[in-house]
Amino acid sequence: MTAPIIYTSEHLRTDHKTTCVANDIFAALDKLHVEHRELKNTQDYWCRDYMPVMIYKDGTYAKFEYNPDYLVEDNKLRDYITNQQNTCKQLNLYAPMNMNIVFDGGNYVRCGNKVIMTDKIFSENPQWPTHYLIQHLQIALCADIILLPWDMEDPYGHADGMVADLGDGQILLNGCWKKQYAPFHRRLRKILDAHFNVEELPAWDGDKHSWCYINYLHVPGGILLPCLSENYDTKDDIAALKYFEQLFPDLEIIPIYSKSLIKGQYGGGALHCVTWEYIEKNDSSVPLTNSL
């Protein structure tokens, strides 16, 4: 497979709060010999959300309407809505499918021939009958759709804050609900256990933002892991680094101090949220997984 190019929005580098994390991401990618570039014509640095989703490893993408309610319904935030078409003009992007539905790339976790998303997709597209919407998604994304319940305390409803693909039918589930929201956690496990082998990211007892570790970036040769302390020396950071070293023994784990993202622009996210993989079209047609 052609190696991915990792894109970030130019705003990640130019925003004074996130310049340092941008430079750290670039340095880590350089260390791993992963090419990286910047997207132009963007309105914020959460590029995962507004860029097309890849449906095949050959560089086949699907476009959608980026019009999220958490921006649309707040007059102060509407200016942050990026026009996907304008941003894609700089790319030689092969996107034969436009889903023509309101969608969000953060609510898309590809796991082989399955896609995990939250059921927030229904409230974003109320004009679609439920069964037609699911059928449309399955056809557009060439995948079975696995729906998780939306944690209503999270206005974004993003699946990439809940799970990550580990490849070969295995996923990583964020364990942050296990202690405080046990019924919700049980619902997640019941759904996911029916489709995947589930590895669970521990819910450590320290920083309330320890949910962020699930939002890592997996690139060839390494894992860029968001951390909560500048020296990666808090109890949670130390535990997370050790856990990911055991989970990915053949990859280099590179910690990135990400507090400015986790408490970032109109909400929080981490390294997966501010990056996007671009693969130039070739002749293969192998179903995509997020494990590059």
Image (cartoon, rainbow, N blue to C red):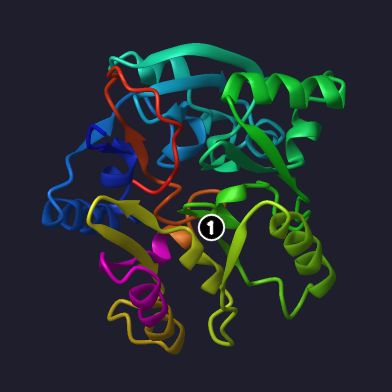
Q: Nearer the viewer, residue 217 or 249?
A: 249
Q: Nearer the viewer, residue 263 or 228?
A: 228
The local secondary structure at tag 1 comes to: strand
- In this figure, which residue is indicated by the disc labeled 1? 170
User: Left or right: where does residue 257 sit relative to residue 98?
Assistant: left
Image coordinates for residue 95, horizontal then vertical, percent: 44, 14
Asked if 252 appears above or below 54 in the picture, the reply is below
- Quarter location, residue 109: top right
Kindly identify the residue that appears in the image at 60 percent across and 39 percent down: 114
Kindly identify the residue that appears in the image at 37 percent across and 77 percent down: 246
Split into 4 quadrants, where in the image is the N terminus? top left
Image coordinates for residue 285, horizontal then vertical, percent: 39, 23
Q: Is residue 59 magenta?
A: no
Which residue sits furthest right?
129
Q: Is residue 269 visible?
A: yes
Q: Nearer the viewer, residue 93 or 292?
A: 292
Kindly identify the residue that appears in the image at 44 percent across and 35 percent down: 288
Image coordinates for residue 23, horizontal then vertical, percent: 20, 54
Query: What amino acid type should be assigned to the residue bearing mark 1?
Result: Gln
Asked if 258 appears above or below 106 in the picture, the reply is below
Boundaries of the magenta span: 241-260
Q: Is residue 244 magenta?
A: yes
Q: Is residue 65 visible?
A: no
Q: Nearer the viewer, residue 200 or 100?
A: 200
Asked if 83 appears above or below 213 in the picture, the reply is above
- Quarter location, residue 161: bottom right
Please tell me how crowded label 1 is: few (under 14), some (14-19), or many (20+) other residues with Cα within 10 Å.
some
Image coordinates for residue 102, horizontal then vertical, percent: 66, 24
Kindly identify the residue that appears in the image at 67 percent across and 25 percent down: 138
Asked if 42 appears above or below 292 in the picture, the reply is above
